[in-house]
Image (tube, rainbow, N blue to C red):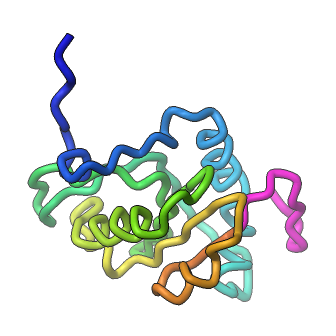
Amino acid sequence: MAIPKAKTLQEKFGFMDSDIKKPEHDEMIRWIDDNILDILMVEFGCAARPKGIRTRWEPVVRQTSGGGGIIGFVDFIARQSDRRIVFEAKTAIESLGVLFRQVRMYQEGYIDGCPIYEMPIVVVCPDDTHAKTIREQGLRFIKYDPKMKFALGGV
């Protein structure tokens, strides 16, 4: 049986995201989606609960604002008017280099014609060992804990 050809630019560079096949990854995305208002308030210091937030799982990242080839798929995006926030969920971070290369490749692309380099990127992982380094690289980090109750009330 032939090995399937890479369909995205990330696959061509050898970045195969094994997380997308794990049920834990889906649980993390569901947690982000279910708690998005509180996450935005805590992570971005909103004075009031955000309104009009739309979310989408696995939006495609394109090479150009007009479309072009597929770079890959970010895990989750939250949108309020013209503001977009990207979330990358990891069940574990085995290599910071791989994580940063994946994110940097995304930052060269576009979602719905908008450049990702202008969007905050939030890494979500149950292990916060690398949180400081991730933040030092200009990304945000949230520790995933499905039992966490947000002080702001939850949704």
Range covered by the magenta-colored residues: 143-155
In the image, taking residue 78 as reference, residue 15 lies left or right, namely left
- Residue at horizontal 70%, vertical 69%? 128
Count of numbered tags:
0
Residue 152: percent from left, percent from top? 86, 73
Q: Is residue 9 above or below residue 109?
A: above
Which of the 4 image quadrants contains residue 148?
bottom right
Residue 42: percent from left, percent from top? 73, 79
Question: Which part of the image, by quadrant, shows the C terminus?
Answer: bottom right
Q: Is residue 8 above or below residue 84?
A: above
Which of the 4 image quadrants contains residue 67?
bottom left
- Residue at horizontal 65%, vertical 60%? 125
Question: Which part of the image, by quadrant, shows the N terminus?
Answer: top left
Residue 133: percent from left, percent from top? 56, 82
Which of the 4 image quadrants contains residue 153?
bottom right
- Residue at horizontal 35%, vertical 62%? 102
Q: Is residue 85 magenta?
A: no
Residue 129: percent from left, percent from top? 69, 71
Q: Is residue 44 above or below residue 52?
A: below
> Quick one: 62 or 15, which is closer to the camera?
15
Magenta highlight: main SS: loop
> Quick one: 36 or 94, which is closer to the camera?
94
- Residue at horizontal 54%, vertical 71%? 122
In the image, taking residue 84 as reference, residue 65 lies left or right, namely left
